[in-house]
Image: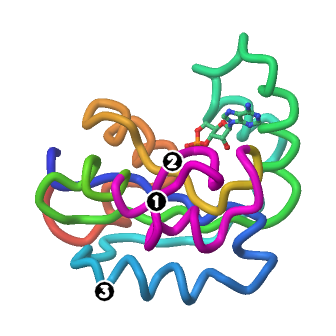
Amino acid sequence: MENITLAIIKPDAVAAGNAGKIIDRILQTGFKIRASRIIHLTRGQAEDFYAVHRERPFYDELTTFMSSAPAMPLVLEKSGAVEEFRKLMGATDPAEAEKGTIRKDFAKNKGENAVHGSDSDENAQKEVAFFFAQSDILGNF
Ligand code: CMP
């Protein structure tokens, strides 16, 4: 599992018409897309996905935003996928994100920050399973 991660192109980026540019950036960086879909999360689904942040002050804002419009989850493959995608994504706050990162170029603020990426191999496994059945994913993991 160390070669896959779950990415989400968040509602702000999809609504702004930036999904194509972000996918292009992902492919140009050497990731292979093993599964993709577009989904308008319900509030309950957003709450379940981000359950680990339940006690955080931004949980309500985060789950309202993530269920506000369609998003695009992707299963990405690359050696060291979790770490590699976190590098490409940039810091949570776009004001702190490095030049050339997706969040630097497409995120508005800490909340509406264009993309999500798994933070560990263990969470990647859980997050992939949240959106995809094994039969939706190309290749054998
Ligand atoms: P993500 O990688 O999807 O994981 C958790 C999300 O919580 C994070 O990106 C941000 O979008 C959001 N988040 C983190 N900190 C804040 C904050 N201070 N205010 C609003 N949203 C936040």
Question: Per the image, is 103 magenta?
Answer: yes
Q: Nearer the viewer, residue 131 or 106?
A: 106
Residue 98 numbered mark, or none: 1
Relative to the observer, which residue lies in front, 15 or 113? 113
What's the amino acid at mark 3?
Answer: Gln
- Secondary structure, mark 2, is loop
Q: Is residue 102 above or below residue 131?
A: below
Q: Report the span colored magenta.
A: 87-110
Badge 3: how crowded within 10 Å, few (<14), some, or many (20+)? few
Say few, some or many: other residues with alpha carbon within 10 Å of mark 2 (under 14 / 14 to 19 / 20 or more): some
Q: Is residue 109 left or right of residue 106?
A: right
Q: Assign a secondary structure to mark 3.
A: helix
Spatial distance from mark 2 to mark 1, Cα to Cα? 7 Å
**Quarter assignment of residue 138:** bottom left
Dot 1 crowding, Cα within 10 Å, few <14, some 14–19, many 20+: some
Q: Where is ligand 1, by quadrant?
A: top right
Whether tag 2 and tag 1 are in contact, CB under 8 A, the answer is yes
Three-letter amino acid code at disc 2?
Ala
Q: Where does label 3 land, which residue?
A: 28
Q: Residue at x 57, y 49 (%)?
A: 96
Kind of residue at badge 1: Glu
Q: Residue 93: horizontal and vertical position, in percent?
A: 63, 46
User: Does any atom of ligand 1 lie closer than 8 Å to the CB of label 3?
Assistant: no
Q: Is mark 1 within 8 Å of ligand 1?
A: no
In contact (CB < 8 Å): disc 2 and disc 3? no
Separation of disc 2 and disc 3 at Cα? 20 Å
Viewer-nearest of discs 2 and 3: 2
Q: Quadrant of the N terminus?
A: top left
Which SS class for mark 1?
loop
Which residue is painted at 15% across and 52% down in the image? 80
- For marks 2 and 3, the one nearer the N-term is 3
Q: Position of residue 122 (x, y in %)?
A: 28, 30
